[in-house]
Amino acid sequence: MKPSSGPAITVGMATAYALAVLHVLPRLYFYPRVGLWSWSAVAIEPSISWYGYVGWALVGGLAARWISRFVPWRTPWRLALIVPLLVLAGLFWAQHAWFGL
């Protein structure tokens, strides 16, 4: 039975999401009124940047899945539980001003 690459995908998605939220990766915006995706802000149009964060997370998961096929070791499930928790704690700390702390 072939081992699962699920833990690697989880780690890749959590890492890419954190990098997108912290603006290490290029920002990706969606403009729902005009149905437009853009790498830059469009004047006078409200945008949804969270869709871009989720898109980067999907790219990170796919990249981790692809890389996991070529490495000889598999990502343990415990790491797939710990990394997202650490990412959430780190994002909370980085964005704590939004929570009024």
Image (tube, rainbow, N blue to C red):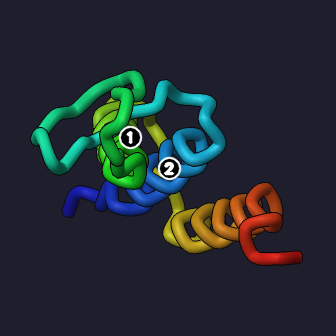
Q: Helix, strand or loop at disc 1?
A: helix
Residue 69 makes an appearance in the image: no
The answer to whether residue 11 is left or right of residue 55 is right
Name the kind of residue labelled 2 in the image: Tyr
Could you tell me residue 28's position as x and y percent?
A: 37, 33
Q: Helix, strand or loop at disc 2?
A: helix
Mark 2 to mark 1 CA distance (whole Å):
6 Å
Vertical side of 29 occupied by 8: above or below: below
Q: Extreme left residue here? A: 35
Residues tagged 2 and 1 counted as in contact (Cβ below 8 A): yes
Q: Which mark is residue 23?
A: none
Query: On the image, numbered disc 2 is attached to which residue?
Result: 17
Query: On the image, numbered disc 1 is attached to which residue?
Result: 56
The answer to whether residue 80 is left or right of residue 23 is left
Residue at image coords 38%, 40% = 56
Residue at image coords 34%, 61% = 6
- Residue 60 occupies quadrant: top left
Foreground of the two, 19 or 79: 19
